[in-house]
Amino acid sequence: MSSAAKEILEAALKLPPEEREHLVEELAASLPNDFASKNIEKAWMDEIGRRSDEIDAGTAELLEWSDVQAQIAQRRARRSGP
């Protein structure tokens, strides 16, 4: 990775999550279609495998759906603000 890219990455990591998410979307959209979709799909498959392994090993923290819904509602309320 070039020093310019490292500087950009360091600055991007200091952004709030919403801005980092938008930045990722814009960067992915700037790449050839097959590049982004293949890499994103592989990353999701790797993550699904990791989480599945944690569940099988008994090391995952499993939550009730009602608790997850409450967490989502809280996050959405914080994002929309006053």
Image: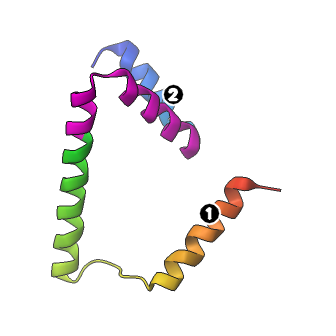
Q: Which residue is mark 2?
A: 11
Residue 17 spot, x, y in % from top left? 54, 45
Judged from the image, the secondary structure of the residue bearing numbered disc 2 is: helix
Residue 52 spot, x, y in % from top left? 19, 71
Q: Is residue 18 above or below residue 12?
A: below
Q: Quadrant of residue 75?
A: bottom right
**Horizontal relation, residue 30 to residue 80: left or right:** left
Report the amino acid beneath label 1. Arg
Q: Residues within 10 Å of mark 1 (few under 14, many from 20)?
A: few
Q: Which residues are magenta?
A: 17-39
Q: Which residue is mark 1?
A: 75
CB of mark 2 within 8 Å of CB of mark 1?
no
Query: Which of the pair 33/73 is nearer the observer?
Result: 33
Q: Looking at the figure, which quarter contains the C terminus? A: bottom right
Mark 2 and mark 1: span between their CA atoms? 24 Å
Instruction: Please tell me which of labels 2 and 1 falls first in the chain.
Output: 2
Is-magenta flag for residue 6?
no
Judged from the image, the secondary structure of the residue bearing numbered disc 1 is: helix
Residue drawn 36% across and 30% down?
28
Q: Residues within 10 Å of mark 2 (few under 14, many from 20)?
A: few
Which SS type dominates the magenta stretch?
Answer: helix
Residue drawn 57% across and 68% down?
72
Q: Quadrant of residue 56?
A: bottom left
Q: Nearer the viewer, mark 2 or mark 1?
A: 1
Q: Is residue 25 above or below residue 63?
A: above
Report the amino acid beneath label 2. Ala
Residue 34 spot, x, y in % from top left? 21, 29
Q: Looking at the figure, which quarter contains the N terminus? A: top left
**Horizontal relation, residue 71 to residue 58: left or right:** right
Return the residue found at the far right: 82
Return the residue found at the far front: 33
